[in-house]
Image: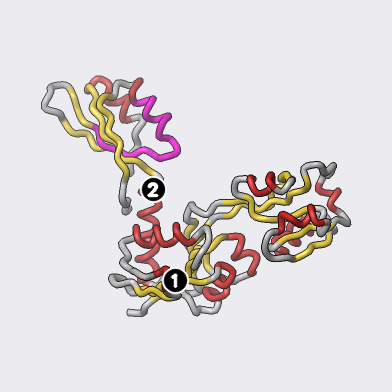
Amino acid sequence: MKTLKIAIQKSGRLNEKSVEILKNCGLSFENYKSSLIATVANFPLEILFLRDDDIPEYVQDGIADLGIVGENVIIEAGADVSYLQPLGFGKCTLKIAVQSTSNITELSQLNGKAIATSYPVILQKYLSENNVDAQIRNISGSVEIGPGLGLSDAIFDIVSTGGTLKSNGLKAFKNVMDSQAVLIASKGMELNPEVLELLQRIQSVLRAKATKYVVLNVAKENLQAVVDLLPGVKSPTVVPLFEEGWVAVHSVIAEEDFWEKINGLKLAGAEGIVVMPIEKIIT
């Protein structure tokens, strides 16, 4: 059995969530903060801790079989890898921003302007697709200071909350790309049995995070109205209660529909609603 290698960010905004999802998959490893490599005790896997910019190339070249990294980093690197699973964390948007006092309101007004960025490949593709001829100034570090220093007329960077833009006297102008962390693999590894096993574990964790387990009591006369609101994984489980004419219903609710469904269940006659987190859902 081959020992797989998975590359994740050593430090930064994706590190903690990457470690968390691997541990939630039942993988046992320690000392990851003090080492560049951690060995998983109960699965044929080694974890490599790298700079996020290096992860796509390591996976493309087969040095790592798998990787967890932002979509934006993969596209910027132009890496030829297989996308296995979006992971739902590390979400951000890459945006063009201008100074708060700028009179730029149309994309065409960027013609002849200078734009500072750490993502020149993504930016150039976007500008070319929109027939904009701007000067791209590739800088690393804090691109937000570019307009204030007279280095550029605009910037193109990751925006999560917008607080950094505002604190530097900038405003978002155009959304270019939405990004999140994804699980990637080297070409040809998609059908590897251990890769498929790890992917199944990750998917079960993601499904569980997206749902809540619900148990409630309802009179039989109101059962159909309640069941109509609860599709469950396949269908709800209905169990008779000791009290005549009443049943307990067990099901799951999508996190995004949670409060709307709970209010609907109460109106349909549900009582004693108990909501619990789910550790894993395996289909």
Q: What's the mark number on residue 6?
A: 1
Q: Position of residue 24 (x, y in %)?
A: 34, 58
Q: Residue furthest left?
A: 242
Whether the magenta-drawn stretch holds residue 135 is answered as no
Label 1 packing within 10 angstroms: few (<14), some (14-19), many (20+): many
Compared with residue 173, is residue 58 higher up or lower down, i.e. above or below?
Answer: below
The segment highlighted magenta reads: 249-265
Q: Position of 68 compared to 251: left or right?
A: right
Badge 2 element: helix
Label 2 packing within 10 angstroms: few (<14), some (14-19), many (20+): some
Residue at 63%, 50% (x, y): give it. 159
Residue at 40%, 63% (x, y): give it. 199
Q: Earlier in the sequence, mark 1 or mark 2?
A: 1
Residue at 74%, 45% (x, y): give it. 169
Tell which of 227 and 47 is nearer to you.
47
Let me know if residue 86 appears in the view: yes
Q: Position of residue 113 (x, y in %)?
A: 85, 55
Q: Magenta: predominant secondary structure element? A: helix
Q: Give the residue type that dot 1 points to.
A: Ile
Q: Position of residue 106 (x, y in %)?
A: 82, 44
Q: What's the mark number on residue 158?
A: none
Q: CA distance from mark 1 to mark 2?
A: 22 Å
Q: Position of 238 compared to 164: left or right?
A: left
Residue at 34%, 69% (x, y): give it. 30
Q: Position of residue 17 (x, y in %)?
A: 45, 57
Let me know if residue 235 appears in the view: no
Q: Position of 86 compared to 246: left or right?
A: right
Q: Which residue is mark 2?
A: 209
Q: Give the residue type that dot 2 points to.
A: Lys
